[in-house]
């Protein structure tokens, strides 16, 4: 495919008399554009940088006071406004039973109960949980020193392999039952679908929930 030839050029490719060389014009134009563009970009970059710096400064120094009940005990903290419930549990309170998986709301490893309902703690800011009751895997037995029926059923039915997803699965299973979504195997599978298990222990997990369902419904645990 041939290139379109500029009208200002003659057949030899030379500039016509009286017409400024397109090379010079183009070069000059590009040079000018580049200079103007660079100046404009530098201006935009510095404005954006300043805005970002201000935002970071504002975000970094902003703290919120939160007051919650975690596993039955009162917790009060001044936290960076960006702290998630997951961070609060693991980093501040050393409650490491709640696991970090994807950190993006996609795996369920971080499941805890907030006022008896399941949440992904990696997606929930501590500030949003102010005043709430949070139950983690450490709190499902409410300090009674024995396994929750759901924990016992997971053991009995081999509802885990590596165990990494298991705290989230058990808390989620308790929530699933308490929310009234465990009437059938199909319903359990549907309402537990937010908790992924890379080891594929789903069969044992479902069997465990079916077994522990009645005892869980009548139990006080789970913060529900
Ligand atoms: S770590 Fe929260 S959903 Fe995966
Ligand atoms: S038991 Fe390994 S990820 Fe579920």
Image (cartoon, rainbow, N blue to C red):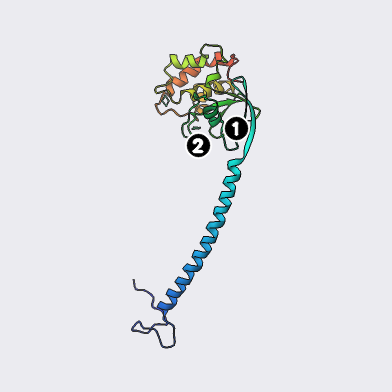
Disc 2/disc 1 C-alpha distance (Å): 16 Å
Quarter assignment of residue 200: top left
Q: Quadrant of residue 217?
A: top right
Closest to the observer, 190 or 114: 114
The percent coordinates of residue 86 (x first, y second) are: 53, 30
Mark with earlier residue (2, 1):
2
Question: Are there few (<14), some (14-19), or many (20+) residues within 10 Å of tag 2?
Answer: few
Residue position marked by numbered label 1 in the rendering: 126
Image quarter for residue 180?
Answer: top right
- Residue 185, how many percent across, how many down? 49, 22
In the image, 85 versus 49, the foreground residue is 49
Q: Kindly identify which numbered label has been placed on residue 104.
A: 2
Mark 1 surroundings: few (<14), some (14-19) or many (≥20) residues within 10 A = many
Residue 205, compared with residue 23, is above or below; it is above
Give the total number of marks visible in the rendering: 2
Residue 87, horizontal then vertical, whole percent: 53, 31
Please tell me whether residue 10 is drawn above or below residue 82 in the rendered image: below
What percent of the width, then of the height, locates residue 222?
A: 58, 20
Residue sitting nearer the eye, 26 or 89? 89
Label 2 sits on a secondary structure element that is: loop
- Is residue 163 rendered to the left or right of residue 83? left
Cβ of mark 2 under 8 Å from ligand 1: the answer is yes
- Secondary structure beneath label 1: helix
Q: Quadrant of the N terminus?
A: bottom left
Quadrant holding the C terminus: top right
- Mark 2 against mark 1, which lies toward the viewer? 1
Whether 83 is drawn above or below 75: the answer is: below
């Amino acid at each position: 495919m041939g290139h379109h030839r500029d009208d200002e050029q003659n057949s030899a490719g030379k500039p016509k008399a009286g017409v400024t060389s397109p090379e010079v014009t183009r070069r000059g134009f590009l040079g000018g554009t580049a200079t103007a563009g660079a100046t404009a970009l530098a201006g935009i970059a510095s404005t954006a940088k300043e805005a970002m710096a201000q935002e970071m400064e504002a975000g970094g120094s902003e703290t919120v006071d939160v007051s919650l009940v975690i596993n039955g005990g009162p917790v009060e903290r001044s936290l960076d406004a960006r702290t998630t419930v997951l961070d609060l549990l693991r980093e501040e309170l050393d409650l490491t039973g709640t696991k970090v998986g994807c950190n993006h709301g996609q795996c369920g490893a971080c499941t805890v109960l907030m006022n008896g309902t399941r949440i992904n703690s990696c997606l929930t800011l501590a500030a949003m949980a102010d005043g709430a009751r949070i139950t983690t895997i450490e709190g499902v037995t409410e300090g009674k020193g024995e396994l929750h029926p759901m924990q016992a059923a997971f053991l009995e039915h081999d509802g885990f392999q590596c165990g990494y997803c298991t705290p989230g699965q058990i808390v989620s299973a308790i929530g699933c039952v308490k929310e009234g979504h465990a009437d059938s195997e199909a319903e359990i599978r549907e309402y537990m679908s937010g908790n992924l298990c890379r080891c594929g222990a789903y069969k044992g997990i479902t069997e465990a929930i079916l077994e522990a369902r009645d005892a869980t419904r009548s139990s006080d645990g789970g913060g529900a």
